Amino acid sequence: MERGHTRGYETVGYVISGSAELTLEGQTVQLEPGDSWVVPAGAEHDYRILETFTAVEATAPPARAHGRDEE
């Protein structure tokens, strides 16, 4: 089985439309419109998009903090 990803920052999300599966530290949950989720910093996780998916995500610290995700 392929290992998930880890990040050094927390991610919080909210599903607007579509569906996906989030596997977080070995537990899988289905995400549908109106659902929200949190991926703690350092947690192993992976997403699988099940149908066209629109969501809003925020990270802490913000993406542009400390030179992360620079253009």
Image (cartoon, rainbow, N blue to C red):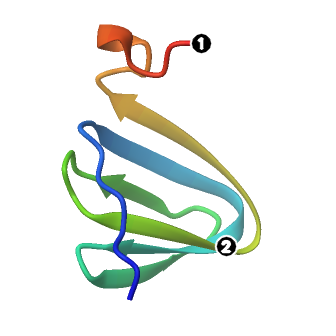
What's the distance in space between the residues labelled 1 and 2, CA to CA? 29 Å
Amino acid type, residue under disc 1 in the picture: Glu
Query: Which residue lies most toward the front here?
Result: 2
Amino acid type, residue under disc 2 in the picture: Ser
Quarter of the image where one finds residue 2:
bottom left
Direction from residue 32 to residue 4 in the image, left or right: left
Identify the residue shown where x is 50% and y is 13%.
70
Query: Which residue lies most toward the right here?
Result: 52
Tell me the SS state at disc 2.
Answer: strand
Residue 21 x, y percent position in the rendering: 53, 77
Where 7 sits versus 48, above or below? above
Quarter of the image where one finds residue 59:
top left
Identify the residue shown where x is 42% and y is 81%.
29
Residue 45 x, y percent position in the rendering: 35, 65
Compare residues 54 and 66 and report the one nearer the observer.
Answer: 66
Residue 36 x, y percent position in the rendering: 45, 58
Of labels 1 and 2, the one closer to you: 1
Quarter of the image where one finds residue 39:
bottom left
Where 67 sits versus 33, above or below? above
Quadrant of the frame with the C terminus: top right
Where 29 sits versus 55, above or below? below
Direction from residue 56 to residue 25 in the image, left or right: left
Direction from residue 67 to residue 71 in the image, left or right: right
The disc at residue 71 is 1
Q: Earlier in the sequence, mark 1 or mark 2?
A: 2
**What residue did someone put label 2 on?**
19
